[in-house]
Image (tube, grey):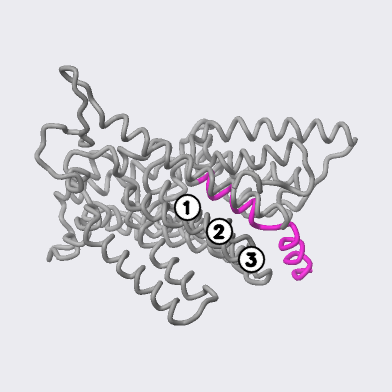
Amino acid sequence: MTGSLSFSKKRELDVLLLVFVFAIPFFNKFETAIIGVIFFFSILEGISKKRISTGIFFWFLPALFLYYSISELSTGGTIRDLEMRLYLILIPLMVFVNPEFQRDDNRDGIYKSYILGNLAAMIFCICRAFVRSISIGNGQWSFNPKVLRDTDYDFLTSSVMGGNYFFGEDLSLFHHPTYAGIFIVFAQYLAFEIFNTTQSSRTRRLMVYCYIFFLGALFLLSSKAAILTSILMSFWIFFRLKMRKPIKIYIVAAFAVVALLFLFFNPRLKVFKDTLKTKDLIDPNARYGYDLRILSWDASLTLISDHWLIGVGEARKKSALGEVYKSKHYVVPAEKLHNSHNLYFDFMIGGGLIALTLFLVGMGNLFVIGWKQRNITLLVFLLIFCFNGLFENLLSRQSGVFFFAAFISLLTTKQGLAADQSTKH
């Protein structure tokens, strides 16, 4: 795979772009350093050529940054509170001064580098889980993946009863399992994209192996939203595959069995399934699972109903939601100050209908650009992000902001933006 990570022009910035994409599944501090190096080489190239190449600066990400800045600072926040939002400016600016990053012939290298990064990050986490599970006592080796080693729970059940080094947050070192799961779902689609476009049978086999490995990784990460996204996307992919109908039916049936196994054997999905069977939708004393998320949604809707136009301000979101939790006697959310667990509710809480409209207009604009240019990868990315935004406030963490800004900037091609702007004129 690494042998095919190439560009039409070999230069330092091309390699740095691959490193930038490869490092997305790892710690974000690595990415900050890489962005700095890319800007450094961009300036050097500009000096050598006595000019800096520029592309088209799409309005959406800077507009989001402007919204966050105004709302945060005007409601008691500080400059430091905007630190993670800087990616909404830095990444599109990085691509703006390096328009070749958006070339169509660079896509293959970007896709493979991102897939390889997710493989490396997940393999590292699994190896780390093995190391953490091994202990030495009285000169003997023992293997016990349970965080609470003296419990009687089996391998799967221990993941929701005390913890298991191979599941969830105990496994995922670099990002919260929700975000790591979303990264992997998008890597799955890119593996399919390469499979669907390459003529190399070896590469096609590699992509199939990657896809299957990522399915196993999602089972271990146990992010319910990511697993559901992967299952829905996989059925869509299988129907798109160009093969004989009997084979396609066999593949779809086999995957349906895999999906059922996920549902019945993944401990966190079993907890979710049991939650749906309960008669009381709202349990103020809930301590885990989707019962907690429902409490967050209920409190968010209450807060939104009182501040639906301009919201309470980005700096006041947490405290305002905490007051609602206390008034409703929602014990755990009040103690831990949970956020809304919904991207759209979060925009309404922070900036009301004005902020939500800004986000929806921007996403709608991107959908139109992707549709006009038949940019399926961009459309799939937007759908993955929007769907998972129903269950998690994806822009409340640096992981989500970085992932969003990086692929919006790289997948929205210069040609697509130019065509969209010429259409408006």
Q: Given the image, on which type of amino acid does mark 2 rest?
A: Leu
- Label 2, label 1: how many angstroms apart (C-alpha)? 10 Å
**Which residue carries the number 1 mark?**
351
**Is residue 245 depicted above or below 20 in this figure?**
below
Whether pointer 1 and pointer 3 mark residues with C-beta atoms closer than 8 Å, the reply is: no
**Marks 2, 3: nearer the viewer:** 3
- Give 273 or 72, whichever is nearer the viewer: 273
**Is residue 256 depicted above or below 47 in this figure?**
below
Q: Given the image, on which type of amino acid does mark 1 rest?
A: Gly
Q: Quadrant of the C terminus?
A: bottom right
Judged left or right of residue 222, residue 147 is left
Secondary structure of the magenta portion, mostly? helix
**Is residue 25 depicted above or below 258 in this figure?**
above
Whether pointer 2 and pointer 1 mark residues with C-beta atoms closer than 8 Å, the reply is: yes
Q: Which mark is residue 375?
A: 3
Q: Given the image, on which type of amino acid does mark 3 rest?
A: Asn
Give the residue furthest to the right: 50
Q: Position of residue 400 (x, y in %)?
A: 48, 46
> Within 10 Å of the Cα at label 2, are there few (<14), some (14-19), or many (20+) other Cα atoms?
some
Give the residue furthest to the top: 138
Q: Position of residue 9 (x, y in %)?
A: 79, 45
At mark 1, the secondary structure is: helix
Q: Which residues are magenta?
A: 401-425
**Which residue carries the number 2 mark?**
358
Q: Residue at x 31, y 34 (%)?
A: 130
Q: Residue at x 21, y 55 (%)?
A: 291
